[in-house]
Image (spheres, helix red, strand yellow):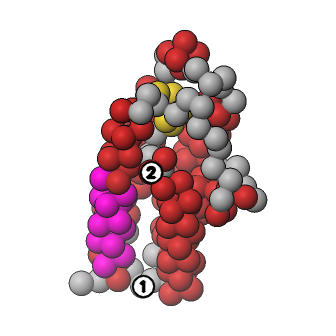
């Protein structure tokens, strides 16, 4: 197995586990009265991440020599990703879910940054393609990701500032 295929296999397994955890958390949060903000924007996030993975699989030669230092950066980012997920715990999802009346998380990296997960994702989207010499993939998908994350942060900040009963506002935001 090539270094590229091994890296992609690990990424795929990690992402599947994360999606299962996020789905379980989403169900639990909704059962507690949480609402999703910007459900219409979520497919764009999914498409970006699927496109990132597929582009690496399809356009990077399997025998591409890896940059081990950049792979180490990507591995270090996974530690940050795990820290973010651990800090949010059962409130971590891949969607924007607001639980009315719940305080903001201010532990782990959230003590210092408002959106550490998005910084990690931006770095991941660039680092893994660069580790295999795929500059074009890193640039194009980083630009697309930046546009989506800027929009998402704006919406998420609005959602986090909602009053304790965001249902009427959330319904409007979901139509954005």
Question: Is any part of residue 126 visible from this angle?
Answer: no
> Which residue: 29% across, 66% down?
13
Q: Residue 65, labelled with which disc?
A: 1
Which quarter of the picture shows residue 27?
top left
Q: Could you tell me residue 18's position as x and y percent?
A: 37, 57
What's the magenta region? Answer: 6-20
> Which residue: 64% across, 41% down?
103
Which residue sits furthest right? 112
Q: Is residue 5 above or below residue 35?
A: below
Q: Could you tell me residue 63's position as x and y percent?
A: 33, 82
- Report if the CB atoms under discs 2 and 1 are less than 8 Å apart: no
Crowd class of label 2 (few under 14; some 14 to 19; many from 20; radius 10 Å): some
Question: Is any part of residue 65 visible from this angle?
Answer: yes
The quadrant of the picture occupied by the N terminus is bottom left
Q: Is residue 77 above or below residue 52?
A: below
Q: Could you tell me residue 99's position as x and y percent?
A: 52, 34
In this view, the mark in front (2 or 1): 2
Q: Residue 90, labelled with which disc?
A: 2
* Magenta stretch: dominant secondary structure: helix
In the image, taking residue 17 as reference, residue 93 lies left or right, namely right
Q: Could you tell me residue 58's position as x and y percent?
A: 30, 61
């Amino acid at each position: 197995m090539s270094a590229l295929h091994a890296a992609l296999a690990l990424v795929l397994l990690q992402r599947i586990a994360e999606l299962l955890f996020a789905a379980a958390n989403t169900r639990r949060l909704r059962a507690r009265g949480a609402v999703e903000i910007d459900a219409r924007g979520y497919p764009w996030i999914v498409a970006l991440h699927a496109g990132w993975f597929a582009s690496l699989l399809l356009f990077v030669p399997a025998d591409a020599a890896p940059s081990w230092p950049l792979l180490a950066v990507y591995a270090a980012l996974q530690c940050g990703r795990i820290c973010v997920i651990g800090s949010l715990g059962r409130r971590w999802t891949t969607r924007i879910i607001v639980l009315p009346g719940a305080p903001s998380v201010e532990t782990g990296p959230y003590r210092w940054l408002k959106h550490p997960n998005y910084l990690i994702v931006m770095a991941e989207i660039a680092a893994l393609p660069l580790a295999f010499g795929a500059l074009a993939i890193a640039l194009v998908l980083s630009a697309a990701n930046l546009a989506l994350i800027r929009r998402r942060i704006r919406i998420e900040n609005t959602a986090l500032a909602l009053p304790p009963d965001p249902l009427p506002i959330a319904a409007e935001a979901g139509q954005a």
